[in-house]
Image (cartoon, helix red, strand yellow):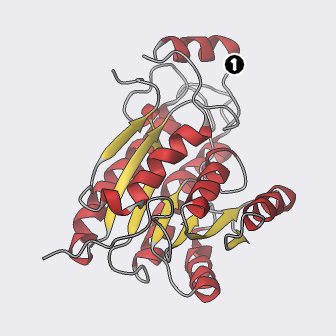
Amino acid sequence: MTTIEVRSMDKPLTGKVALVTGGSRGLGAATVRLLAKQGADVAFTYAGSGEQAQAVVDEVRGTGAEVAAFQSDQADTSRAPALIDGVVERFGGLDILVNNAAISVNATVDDPDADFAALDRMHTTNYLGVIAITRAASRVMRDGGRIITVSSGLGTRAGVPGLADYAATKAGVTQYTKGIARDLGPRAITANVVEAGLMTGGMAAPDAETLKLLLGSLSLQRLGHPDEIAAAIAFLASPAASYVTGAVLDAHGGYNA
């Protein structure tokens, strides 16, 4: 029989250790703040901006929560084991992994001027990098853990030209996460996807015409806020989602409606 842990309603993640990739800005930073607010000790990665990362650390520590930033380029998959080892050494374990880090490079498949090196880096960062970190984390994650991967509505429906490569990376991690749910189910580790949509403070916005088309395709015809998507991630990380795995939770304003 499954034992359900009883925790305080306002801090349901007390005693848990979380790792959020790409946590220095946008959705990643919002997720770091919310998981910490709910009681978790939180590690997060950043690729370039040490100042942004330190600002998040200072803000979260100011609330009394434990937090640490780790510089790690997800495009270098060989660094994944050392990253996970560093988190475990710092916090004593790992319970929650949020695969959030990603980059966006747009080009139509027949564009003669496409930057193929940049496209290849995106595939490595968004897909192979997620796989590398998840593999490393799965070996040390405590039973009953949570893996949440941030995908995109574009992984289900590209919608406009120029997004084939980006959409492929997001569709790939969605299907990979469903496989993870099967592999790790015997250890009561859940694996789920949050399909995020366009939001303020996220990746660079598309051009004005493309943005107009994308917003017009939504049931809620507005940009989302990172806090709204972070709330979906926090739910899947919580004890309340203990029987949810292999699922895709849409948090993109009704892009697929």
Number of marks drawn: 1
* Residue 9 on image: x %, y %: 44, 60
Q: Residue at x 50, y 72 (%)?
A: 14
**Under tag 1, what secondary structure?**
loop
Above or below for 94 versus 127 = below
* Residue 24 on image: x %, y %: 72, 55
Q: Residue at x 60, y 60 (%)?
A: 37
Q: Residues within 10 Å of mark 1 (few under 14, many from 20)?
A: few
Q: Is residue 203 left or right of residue 81?
A: right
Q: Quadrant of residue 51?
A: bottom right
Q: Residue at x 82, y 63 (%)?
A: 54
Identify the image quadrant of the C terminus.
top left
Q: Is residue 114 left or right of residue 150?
A: right
Amino acid on which disc 1 is placed: Asp
Residue farthest to the right? 51
Residue matched to label 1? 207
Identify the image quadrant of the N terminus.
bottom left
Residue farthest to the left? 1
Nearest to the observer: residue 138 or residue 61: 61
Q: Is residue 217 left or right of residue 202?
A: left
* Residue 21 on image: x %, y %: 60, 60
* Residue 165 on image: x %, y %: 51, 37
Q: Residue at x 43, y 57 (%)?
A: 148
Q: Quadrant of residue 74?
A: bottom right
